Amino acid sequence: MSKVASKQILLQGNEACVKGAMLAGCRFYAGYPITPATEIMEVMARDLPKAGGVFIQMEDEISSLGAVIGASLTGAKSMTATSGPGFSLMQEHIGFACMAEVPCVIVNVMRGGPSTGLPTQPSQGDVMQSRWGTHGDHPIIVLAPSSVYEFFELTVEAFNLSERYRTPVIILVDEIVAHMREGVVLPVEGDIEIEERPRPSVPPEWYIPYGDPGTGVPPMSAFGDGYRHHVTGLYHDVRGYPTTRGDEVEPLIQRFFSKISRDFDRLQWFDSFHTKNALITVIAYGCVARAAHQAVKEARGKGLEVGLIKLKVLWPFMRRTITKVLDNSRKVLVPEMNIGQISREVKRVNQGRCEVVTLNKVDGTPINPPEILKVLEEMYP
Amino acid sequence: MKKTGHLIHEYLRSSKRFPHIWCAGCGIGIFMNALIRVIDRLGYRKDDVVLISGIGCAGRLPVYVDFNTLHTTHGRALTFATGIKLAKPRLKVITVMGDGDAIAIGGNHLIHAARRNVEMATFVINNQVYGMTGGQCSPTTPYGVITTSSPYGNPEPDFDICRLIEAAGAVFVGRSTVYHIHLLDRLIGKALERKGFAMVEVVSQCVTYSGRWLGLDSAVEMMKWQRDRSIVVEKAKRLSEAELKGKIVIGVLVDKERPTYHEECNKLL
């Protein structure tokens, strides 16, 4: 995605998300008010109808994602946004979208939890819920922006990925990035690649709605386009009809995983700073990556050989990228605004390669650069 | 009326592995038959019809029928229906739910769909029991009835679905039993043709469970029970609340005009 020389504008993170969604072709939004995600709904309510789309405020978050999935089944790119408690309510429908392979985008502006928690304060506590929140084995794609521009950019990419793989895509963003205002230069239409879901190219009588065309992603027809078929949350055969046959159930779930895992290489999205020859590498995401960036700069100023990997994709976990980091560092530091969620994954991948240090903060305030710098100095070999 | 063979070949999915999952004597098949018959009479294109259901015995209905069909999550069928209708208004959106699906877990969506008045027809097949899970009491199980989850008798009063949805603002509310098949056909037709949110409660029989709880041994007994307890709304209006106790009031209960959600939105922008 290249930036063009257009005007710089001041945008809030949540507003940038809407801009990205509109550019990606979002034409349906259903939501329910919740702090700190509400601005996404408010801006959608204002802008989407003018762009020919549909906005609706539903009676809760369950119905919001239900309506989003329904709209997507008619061919409309659709999204919703929420925060912790609403995200908990959406879990069953996230599973439905995985099972029925319905593209949709769900933004979770994280607040402190569990329960009502800290509605107005930042957190990164939903990393594991975004991976495993709905019941049953399933793959999921989760993106994590760390700036207003990235929130815009990753919203576009969330739509692209959800269309490409016919899967729900979750954007996990913290309250700081969502409410922060930054000057950004947005790309314009035509300058940005927009992907569409694969459509059937065969006549309706030849259409196999859940067959594998070789890519792992079956072409998706829209309701009303003449390709009448059945969509269900039950395990189904290639025609979409419910089945309990082991030789139909297992291939389906295996295809769910393989359609994304075959593209792991394409999903290694990160930024690195000073990682060459770094003795310590910080692994961070979201607003914490911003603090880590500042801390690494200051540490370099003091002569410490430290670097930073900023993750933009949280799930599927970037094992390949992280393995390289672990191989090339003496120690890694994983600062997070939770009790330790991504650090568990780093340790899982680590398998004795190097020492993994964690820095966890769950008091509702952001991790700041001096806190990271202090730990870097203490752990410096 | 067209021959049954025509309806079977035109509307039932030959590619689906029949037989269906319903017990012998179940009322859902009678409703499905009526729905297909009325849609055929109204001449809708199959490509334009979306049939949506929730979870439970009634939730299995769409898979057998050759429309755009969607079997959603428990209680949430109307939320998917809302998204579909708003995103593609030209589609004919029909939702089928059971009593537990529509009134218990999905009660909130049902009242808001009625209030919102997005154009769609909703059919609640009320067999007074959770059939698929083995005969537990539902919000429409009569007071005092013994079920697998009320072994000492149901301590709760039952819900009047139609009055609830009338209060929520539906423009069309009707009730029939599967015994009163001609009335059922008429109500289905009216609901499908209404602008706005239309709901029909279809009182049905679960021979396997609610029949057993009510002491009725067969589908025939249960349908006679429906016949004997039913009273048409015109007659019911002349009776007192006490006289109507235990009766099933059937017919068109609400029929009024109100702008749909689409019409209201179009006024604004």
Image: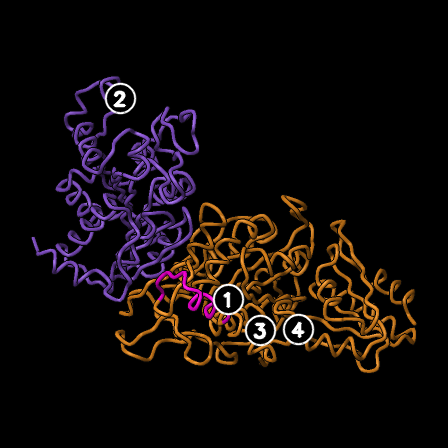
Say whether residue A102 is visible.
no
Mark 2 lies on a secondary structure that is loop
Q: Is residue B163 left or right of residue A12?
A: left
Chain in orange colour: A
Q: Nearer the viewer, residue B173 or B72?
A: B72
Q: Earlier in the sequence, mark 4 or mark 1?
A: 1
What is the quadrant of the C terminus of chain A in the image?
A: bottom right
Q: Which residue is mark 2?
A: B245
Q: Nearer the viewer, residue B141 or A359?
A: B141
Binning the other alpha carbons within 10 Å of mark 4 as few (below 14), some (14 to 19) or many (20 upward) gives: many
Whether callout 1 and callout 3 share a subunit is answered: yes
Q: What is the spatial separation of the Cα atoms under label 4 and label 1, in whole angstroms?
A: 25 Å
Instruction: Give me the residue at 80% from left, 61% from top.
Output: A358
Name above or below for residue A31 compared with residue A21. Answer: above
Query: Residue B59 location in percent, x, y?
Result: 34, 50
Mark 4 lies on a secondary structure that is loop
Q: Nearer the viewer, residue B260 or B241?
A: B241
Instruction: Give me the residue at 80% from left, 68% from top.
Output: A294
Q: Is residue B121 left or right of residue A98?
A: left
Camera-near label (1 vs 3) is 1
Q: Is residue A248 magenta?
A: yes
Instruction: Give me the residue at 35% from left, 63% from top.
Output: A241
Whether callout 2 and callout 1 share a subunit is answered: no
Q: Which residue is mark 4?
A: A318
The three-letter code of the residue at mark 3 reads: Leu
Tell me if label 4 and label 2 are in contact, CB under 8 Å: no
Camera-near label (3 vs 2) is 2
Say whether residue A46 is visible.
yes
Where does the magenta region start and end? A240-254
Q: Which residue is mark 3?
A: A186
Name above or below for residue A133 compared with residue B228. Answer: below
Query: Residue B61 location in percent, x, y?
Result: 29, 53
